[in-house]
Every structure is written in structure tokens, then in C-alpha cells.
Image (spheres, grey):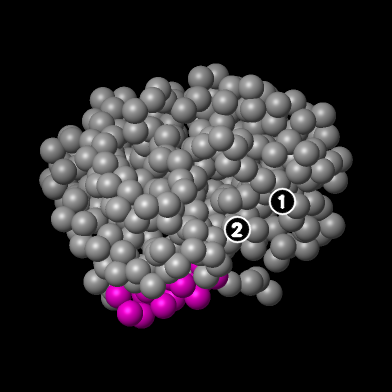
Amino acid sequence: MIETFLMERMQSTYENVVDFDLSESGVRPVTLREMVDFGFDLDALMDSPLGYSQSNGTIELRERIAAMYPGSTINHVEVTNGTSEANYILALTLIRAGDSVALQIPNYLQLWGVPRSLGATVERFQLERVDGSWEIDWDSFERAVTPKTRFVYITNPNNPTGSVLSREAMKRIVARVEEVGAYLIADEVYQGAEIDGERTPSFWGMSDRVIVTSGLSKAYGIPGVRIGWMVGPPEIIASCWTQHDYITICPNKISDHIARVAVSPDVRKQLYARTRAVLRENLPMLRSWAAEMGDFFEYTPPTAGAIVFMKYNSDAKSIAMCERILKEQSTLVVPGLHCGVESYIRVWLGAKPEYLQGGLARLRTGLAPLVGAGV
Ligand SMILES: Cc1ncc(COP(=O)(O)O)c(C=O)c1O
């Protein structure tokens, strides 16, 4: 038995039927025509037989992915159906019943449900907002990461806070992982979606206990082609390939073609620039919207990613509140509890400005009974 993935279920149930979906987390997606403008040869694909693709990703795509991770080769890379399949296969490959997994909270909670379904326990460690900046609570980290820990799962840049770990924090995490003989799964799917700052450093290369997962869904703005990957020690990647053969056999052939274009150095840069432009345009709108509600929200704007995680000044429960707003305002946002913490909402920043404006106006109407009421 596996428990319901509450955030994904709420999104997939409502995202296509509401007036305003502010529950997404990547920038608004690139079109196929834009990919053609970026160099994707649609015409050549017309004559390509729609057969199976290579099950661990074509050599050409793995070469291009390996080129992004210094020191890696195609044998360090497995291409998957989205980052989520990479995370899932890693959990299936690594976990044995009785293991422990250490999970950063708040987070994308895929690796809350999956390890528990495989008989592992999940220990949480916290990112805390200290003086406006999200930092790891090291006491909870030391408690959560022990010799029983099979792997630590971190998202960096983080979903939902949009925060990025310091180099010192990264080193401390890796040192502890090595000390206890665990692995680190560093989900870096938001890397490249930095709004102003420099590119988020990768955990890749810091230790041979590091496995990076990523994909096209967020910073690249191409979630619909469902291409992700993992990069790790060849023996782990080989075992993951075995799992992959049983699950989905291979990534979609057309998607593999699109991904080869997307990850090529020139196109990648342009896609990141597109993402940055969307976020830079939209963040000021969200800031003024929040400011109009006085001290109702406390939040730190994201360093990277199309999401803002906002603490609200009310004792309303986040799931009930978001369900009410969904019903009354036909507007969907993610309740904090779906990311592991109460009294927050996660709001999407990646829409077209007029759509974001419309959604925020509805959200404001939905929040009106709470604003000014205090806790
Ligand atoms: C941290 C993180 N990892 C993985 C995923 C799923 O990504 P994909 O669409 O590549 O499967 C998400 C989606 O929100 C995410 O936030």
C-alpha cells in the first residue's frame, strides 16, 4: 500500500478545471513551435519510426547530459520519464525494509510516501526561516541522519521555499552523509531557475555518495515531454536501469529528441534566460499584492524557482483554507501542509502576467475574511 500523494492528487484533480491554477511550480511551458525555433527539427522527426527508444536514454542524450556534470560519462547517466521517475527508481533500488531515509522539510513530498511504502521509516529535518533566510536546523539534521540512513533527500534549490543552500551547508551535508555511509539524493530540478543570482552549485562531484536527479520540467519549462535523469556512481545507475526495464522500459522517443535540443549548451542558456525573464516580470506583482495585505504574509522571495512560500498570519488550517478558496474562487494554490508545514501557502509565479493578476485577485478575495482578523 502507498499513501496518497496529497499535493499531486489535489493538483491533478483540479488544475485543469479551475479558473486560475496557481499551484504549478515551473515557468509556463515552452511550445513545440518555440522548440522548433530553438533548433528542434520537427520535419526530420516526421520520417523517424515511432519505435522504442533506448531504455536508459539514447547515447547522444546521455552524452549531452554527462557534459553538464564534470567527470561523468554516459555510464553515470540514466534518462527517465521525468525527475519523479528518477527519484522513484532510486528509492526502489536503494531501500530495503527497515532502512531509514532522511527528508528535508518543507519539500516536494514524493520521497515521504515512496520510502514508507517500501518499509523504510522517514526522519525529517527542517529548513527554518531565520532572519528572513531559510537555513537547515542542524540539530534536527544530526538526529535524522544516522548509521541507519540509506539516503538523504534534499531539493536544492528547494521546493517550496525557492531557497538555495550555502556552500558551507552543502559541505556539511555531504560530510555527514559520508560519515554515516549513506547516499545523498540531490534533486536539482530547479537549478537554472535563479531569478538574479548566480547559478546554484551542483552537489555533483562533492563525493562518490552523491546522486543528482534533475529534468526538463522546471528551469527549462518543458514538463510535458516527461524527461528527467539521474547522475550517479555507475554501479547504482546500472541497478536503476534494471528497475527501469521493469517499469516503463524507456523514455518516449519523441521526448528524447526534444531533450537533446533542450540540454545543448546554447539552447539551455536561452531557456534559462526565458525562465528568468518570466520570474523577474512577475515577482514585483506578487510583492505589491502581498504588501496590500499589510502584515498578513511573511515570506522570503525565492532565490530560484517559480514559487513563493508564504506564511500567513491566521490560525486557519492550510488544507481547509485552500479547499475553501478552491470552491469559492475557483483558484488553486498549494496548502503548506502538502509540503510538510502548516500555516503556509505556495503560490505560482510562472504564469502570464494577466493570468497571475487574475489569480491573485481571486486569492485576495478568498483570503479577505482572514486578513486583518489576526490569529
Ligand atoms: C523537487 C521536485 N522534484 C521532482 C518533481 C517532479 O518533476 P518531473 O515533472 O520532472 O517528474 C517536482 C515537481 O514539482 C519537484 O518539485
The answer to whether residue 338 is seen in the rendering is: no
Q: Can you tell which mark lies on residue 56?
A: none
Tell me, for residue 340, which label it has, or none.
2
Q: Is residue 231 above or below residue 254?
A: above
- Three-letter code for the amino acid on which mark 1 is drawn: Arg
Q: How many marks?
A: 2
Question: What is the distance, in whole Å, between disc 1 and disc 2 at their CAs?
Answer: 9 Å
Residue 371: x, y in percent?
40, 64
* Residue 13: quarter of image: bottom left
First in residue order: circle 1 vs circle 2: 1
Magenta span includes 348:
no
Looking at the image, the residue that sits furthest to the bottom is 327
Query: In the image, what residue occupies the spot 70% across and 66% down?
Result: 117
Query: Residue 68 at what x, y percent from top left?
Result: 44, 26
Identified at 63% across, 72% down, the residue is 3
Residue that appears at 36% across and 40% down: 219
Question: Does the image show residue 354?
Answer: yes
- Secondary structure under tag 2 reads loop
Where is residue 98 shown, x and y percent of the image? 84, 57
Which three-letter amino acid code belongs to the residue tagged 2? Answer: Gly
The spot of residue 328 in percent (x, y) is 33, 79
Q: Does the residue at mark 1 contact the one at mark 2 (Cβ under 8 Å)?
A: yes
Left or right placement of residue 141 versus residue 190 in this view: right
Q: At x 55% / y 19%, what residue is drawn?
A: 71
Magenta region: which residues? 317-329
Q: Which residue is mark 1?
A: 124
